[in-house]
Image (tube, grey):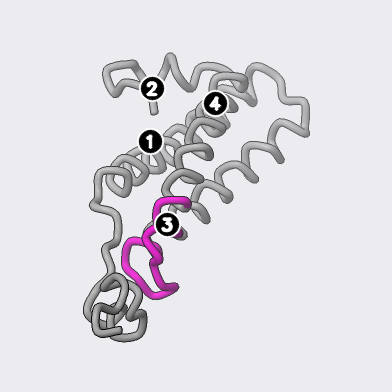
Amino acid sequence: MRNHTEGAGTRFASPSNIEAELQTWSDAIDQLVLGYLAAGAWPHDTYRLRVEALRHKHTAVQTRFNAFKATTPSETTWRSFRAGLTAELKALESDLAAVSSAIEPQPTAAHSEQHPAAHGPRRDL
């Protein structure tokens, strides 16, 4: 993610800038997914649900942006569209920062009971 001191106006000034931001955020979300997979997060784990919600939000913004780009917009329509999209981009960025700073999932007692390997190798053998 970019430094928060950069103005949103600069980062979201052109379609290519937004495209680059969306790609950067997609890569960051992919890393979060790898993190919860490596931690063995279950489908109902809060951390995993937050990452999945973030992925859906990103996909919705990306889809909306791609649909707009396909219309070959004029400068006037671009400014109008960007004004509406900027709030969504800021929210996505904020959510990504919040999830990224959260502690990745750790196996819980419920996981350990169902996954004895989480405790390490058996010593009684």
Please give the range of residues in magenta: 34-48
Q: Please state which amino acid type lies under the numbered disc 3.
A: Ala
**Residue drawn 30% across the image and 84% down it:** 125
**Cα separation between marks 3 and 4:** 30 Å
Foreground disc of the pair 1, 3 = 3
Badge 1 marks a residue whose secondary structure is helix
**Earlier-in-chain disc, 3 versus 4:** 4
**Residue drawn 45% across the image and 38% down it:** 28
**In the rendered structure, are the residues bearing label 2 and label 4 in contact, judged by CB atoms less than 8 Å apart?**
no
Residue position marked by numbered label 2 in the rendering: 8
Residue position marked by numbered label 4 in the rendering: 18
User: In the rendered view, would you say 98 is above or below 75?
Assistant: below
Which label number is shown at residue 38? 3
User: In the rendered view, would you say 52 is above or below 95?
Assistant: below
Does 32 lie within the magenta span? no
105 horizontally vs 77: left or right: left
Q: Quadrant of the N terminus?
A: top left
**In the rendered structure, are the residues bearing label 2 and label 1 in contact, judged by CB atoms less than 8 Å apart?**
yes
Q: Please state which amino acid type lies under the numbered disc 4.
A: Ile
Crowd band around label 3 with a 10 angstrom C-alpha radius: few (<14), some (14–19), many (20+): few
**Earlier-in-chain disc, 2 versus 4:** 2
Which label number is shown at residue 90? 1
**Cα separation between marks 4 and 1:** 11 Å
Q: Position of residue 46 (x, y in %)?
A: 32, 67
Which label number is shown at residue 64? none
**Cα separation between marks 2 and 3:** 33 Å
5 horizontally vs 48: left or right: left
